[in-house]
Image (cartoon, rainbow, N blue to C red):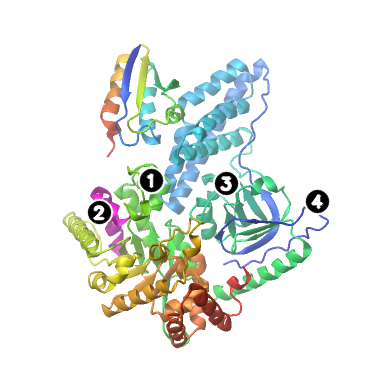
Amino acid sequence: MILKDIVLLNKLGLHIRPAAQFTKIASRYKSDVFLVRDGMRINAKSIMGVMMLAAGQGTRLTMECVGEDEDALCAELMTLIENKFNEE
Amino acid sequence: MKSKPDKPAAPAVGSPPTGVETVMRGIPASPGISIGRVHLLISDCPQAEPRKLAPAEVSRELERFKRALAETQSAIERSRQRALAVAGIAVGKIFDAHKMILDDVVFQEQVRSRVTREQFSVDYIVGDILGQSIEIMQKQQGEMFRERAADIRDVRNRLLRHLSGEGDAVPNRPDEPVILVAPDLSPTDTLHIDRQFIRGLAADTGGLTSHTAILARSLDIPAVVGLGTLTSSVRPGDSIILNGNSGKIILHPTEPTLREYRAKRDRYLEFQRVLANLKDLPATTTDGHEVHVWGNIELPFEAESVLEHGGRGVGLFRSEFLFLTRETVPTEDEQFDTYDKAAEVMAPHPVVIRTFDLGGDKIHGSINLKQERNPFLGYRAIRMSLSRRDLFRAQLRAILRASKRGNVRIMFPFVSGLEELREAKAIVAETAAELERERIPHDPKAQVGIMIELPAAVSIADMLAEECDFFSIGTNDLIQYAVAADRGNEMVAGYYRSFHPAVIRMIGATVKAGHKSKIPAAICGELGGNPLATPLLVGLGIDEISTNAANIPEVKKIIRSVSFADCKQIASHAMHLGTADEITDYLTGELKKRLADLPIWFS
């Protein structure tokens, strides 16, 4: 299992379109990925789950990747987050 | 135009359930009077009872889920296509979001595993899972999350309806003309409403600019919104009167009330028939002075409604609506699509596009705004555009691209002095040069005008007129800034008077300054749709009145019933009256003398 603390730096946070980008990547992998915010833990392959986190710009989250391809999954999601979801 | 008269309603007396006549007040969202029976539209499907499955039923149940998913997917796609066709990309995107929600793989997997494990019917499981999501989203702070909750609810209802085999029909569709009463109307409900059976709309929530209100106006259905608790106070089949002119709802009307309103409605319909005949006639006074009557729009498809009502131009396209249905900044291409649609429908008649009027009370999640102590005296409209060059340039490029037919004009809101006008014009010129270099078609001579809505702009209107192509007076803001009263604040709303002598003098001064530099002056604020104001505005020399599509025929009718000479006299007399009350009384008297049968006399 990989645990990463992340900060959302993109302007929109995890609103519907960024959330869709996130879940699209997550769904391509066998591993599970969860996002945790203030004790709320959601399956990040679910767009409704991700939207429910209500994570705006500057939100701190913990990301948990678990499974056989967790390294690749974690790396790809971290790239997306660091590139601020390619906004603008 | 409402050409078909309403079917007379059966009397309330003796029909169960008989209630006590009750009057409720809401916001008049679309004009007209309707009398009929309540049809409750609760598009929320009730949560199904948990029905236990026999073990052998499970695989059939999963098959049913799969089929319903596929059907709902294509139904959402059909809505998306329809939204794109009638309202453009911004509204279409609502249904993109619905698609993403339905395609949530975790949700789908959860349904399948719970059906298998718990052996309850799929309707119950779907309702249970999505119901929880809706509840969580609703608890979040912020408009955005409530909208998302509404999206999930819309998807949930469609999926449940496909599961039950009802398909995509609006639930309990009426089979006779009714007055639709709903807590709120979802995007799907509004998009698929059947105007043949809906004689009126009454909603618990919503304001003048809610989707329900905009749609009701463009479909010409009388509507009252913001009624609070109406749905919980009525039962299906209750007798109801809806007055979209005054915002009044009367439940369980007595026989005398019904008689009174039938007479009112018939006179109103008669008047509408008279107005319908004016559609293709110009708005010319009896002595031959022509005033242009145009429409204000928010959505591109409303341009058609303007034409249908006899408007020969759009005097105000409020571009901010592009922000209403979304969370991101609209791109240049999305904006182009929207502006171009309106310009195409209206061509060769003009479309005046006002650049974003955001800020003040119209804030938006995708633009970071600091909390301001006084947003109405703060960062809004052209001020925001000039400091957000990226947004402004993208918008100007989109507008200029849409100007390729030569019928698009640009208008800047909230100009307080020459500095902003010059700066904004310079950016228009740079943007046009850029398009020229890229060989993208546009109108190099597109007119550039300004809203006159600040007292400062009125004072220097002569200088502003030298440097722009037209004026358009935004009376709502002009009044509020002139008398320093927010009409939304009930403690001072009484100071907000449309016929304050200062307002009338300011309009007069603006027109004079414009004409001196040979540029036209329009009115695009609410005052333009107020029949009492029409003779006064004509008399002050206003060249163009732009108002909601539904008001156009009435304004035309008044103009065609008066002489320019009389109007000038009315204006000069009103200019010398000392108070708003005196002016209102005077204008009422003058209008009544000339037109005894206007809807305002019986709202």
Assign the magenta stretch its main secondary structure. Answer: helix
Point out the tag, 1 or 3, that comes first from the N-terminus. Answer: 3
The reply to whether label 4 and label 2 mark residues of one chain is yes
Residue with the mark numbered 1: B364
Question: Whole-Å distance between the Cαs marked 4 and 3?
Answer: 26 Å
The part of the image, by quadrant, that contains residue B452 is bottom left
Disc number lying in front (2 or 3): 2
Tag 2 secondary structure: helix
Residue contact at pointers 2 and 3, CB within 8 angstroms: no
Q: Is residue B55 above or below residue B479?
A: above
Point out the tag, 1 or 4, that comes first from the N-terminus. Answer: 4
Point out the tag, 2 or 3, that comes first from the N-terminus. Answer: 3
Q: In this orientation, which residue lies closer to the viewer: B482 or B173? A: B482
Q: In this orientation, which residue lies closer to the viewer: B582 or A54? A: B582
Q: Is residue B9 above or below residue B98?
A: below
Question: Whole-Å distance between the Cαs marked 2 and 1?
Answer: 17 Å
Residue drawn at point x = 42 percent, y = 43 percent: B93
Question: Whole-Å distance between the Cαs marked 4 and 2?
Answer: 62 Å
Residue B184 image label:
3
Question: Whole-Å distance between the Cαs marked 1 and 3?
Answer: 22 Å
Point out the tag, 2 or 1, that comes first from the N-terminus. Answer: 1
Q: In this orientation, which residue lies closer to the viewer: B171 or B355? A: B355
Q: x, y percentage for residue B271?
A: 60, 74
Residue contact at pointers 2 and 1, CB within 8 angstroms: no
Tag 4 secondary structure: loop
Visible in this render: residue B10?
Answer: yes
Residue drawn at point x = 39 percent, y = 31 percent: A20
Task: Tell me which amino acid carries mark 3.
Answer: Asp
